[in-house]
Image (cartoon, rainbow, N blue to C red):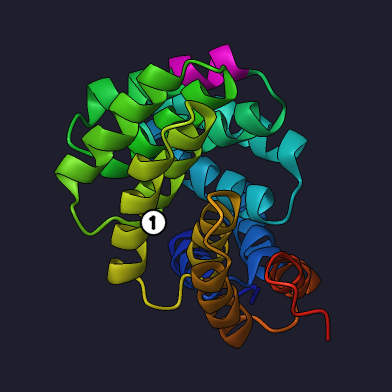
């Protein structure tokens, strides 16, 4: 950072660096802005949130958590801080804390599909599958083009052994996102489990076309060829 820059200029440059995913540089700029500037509590809260998100992106979750805690104390009506803190709780398998943060974010922003999707994931981790499916469904109702929510709901359907519903959701995820390699791979796995090795090979082949560096995809297709007796 330039010594001639004002604190607000540092913040603007830091936010731009964060958008470019230049997280170490963004953190450096936010540090300097916090050191120099006198910000109102809500402005300081947003600045701490932005630095916390940058730390989280680098996997520095202890530092991220400290910033997010401080941001929530200064700016309690800003839902994004709760969302990011919930990601950290989920990563640490503190699922009740993650649920509580997401519920607070939902109270502040009740029409956010991302919050419902994340809440579905937390319930899935807690093995509360019906609640997981309900929340993934809420995300889809709010955003019918949300391919990841369809994909995530599949996990819960598979855990409940509702394989047909899972295939329908994989179909929808793929229709919405043509390059969704994991959706092709998982749908292929379901086809193979149901004894339809030929359709499985089609899906595994498409997944390989999209991400040929993943050895699991080649192994999956090999299993489908084995099921057909195509050993070579």
Q: Residue at x 66, y 18 (%)?
A: 94
Magenta stretch: residue 96 in it?
A: yes
- Determine whether, in the image, residue 216 is placed left or right of residue 149: right
Q: Which residue is mark 1?
A: 170
User: 132 above or below 168?
Assistant: above
User: 13 above or below 45?
Assistant: below
- Who is closer to the viewer here, 59 or 34? 59
Give x and y (percent) for residue 58: 72, 56
Residue that lies at the very extreme toward the front in this rendered image: 229
- Determine whether, in the image, residue 97 is placed left or right of residue 140: right
User: 113 above or below 28?
Assistant: above
- Region in magenta: 95-100
Query: Which quarter of the rendering shows the N terminus?
Result: bottom right
User: 54 above or below 13?
Assistant: above
**Location of residue 42 (image quadrant):** top left
Total of numbered circles in the picture? 1
The kind of secondary structure the magenta stretch mainly shows is: helix
- Who is closer to the viewer here, 231 or 162? 231
Give x and y (percent) for residue 230: 75, 80
Query: Which quarter of the rendering shows the C terminus?
Result: bottom right
- Is residue 79 visible to the viewer in this orientation of the structure? yes
Q: Residue at x 65, y 47 (%)?
A: 56
Magenta stretch: residue 173 in it?
A: no
Q: Residue at x 66, y 58 (%)?
A: 27
- Determine whether, in the image, residue 219 is placed left or right of residue 128: right
**Location of residue 77 (image quadrant):** top left
Callout 1 crowding tier (Cα within 10 Å): few <14, some 14–19, many ≥20: many
């Amino acid at each position: 950072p330039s010594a001639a820059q004002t604190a607000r200029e540092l913040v603007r440059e830091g936010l731009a660096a964060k958008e470019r995913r230049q997280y170490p540089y963004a953190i450096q700029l936010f540090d300097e802005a916090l050191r120099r500037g006198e910000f109102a509590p809500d402005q300081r809260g947003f600045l701490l949130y932005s630095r916390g998100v940058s730390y989280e992106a680098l996997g520095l979750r202890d530092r991220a958590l400290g910033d997010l805690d401080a941001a929530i104390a200064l700016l309690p009506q800003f839902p994004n801080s709760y969302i990011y803190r919930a990601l950290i709780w989920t990563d640490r398998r503190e699922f009740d804390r993650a649920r509580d943060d997401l519920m607070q974010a939902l109270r502040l922003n009740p029409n956010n599909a991302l919050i419902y999707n994340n809440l579905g994931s937390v319930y899935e981790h807690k093995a509360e599958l019906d609640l997981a499916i309900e929340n993934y469904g809420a995300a889809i109702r709010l955003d019918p083009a949300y391919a990841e929510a369809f994909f995530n709901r599949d996990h819960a359907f598979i855990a409940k052994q509702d394989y047909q519903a899972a295939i329908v959701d994989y179909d929808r995820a793929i229709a919405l996102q043509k390059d969704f390699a994991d959706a092709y791979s998982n749908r292929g796995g379901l086809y193979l489990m149901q004894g339809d090795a030929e359709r499985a090979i089609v899906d595994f082949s498409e997944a390989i076309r999209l991400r040929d560096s993943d050895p699991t995809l080649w192994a999956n297709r090999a299993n489908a060829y084995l099921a057909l007796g195509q050993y070579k």
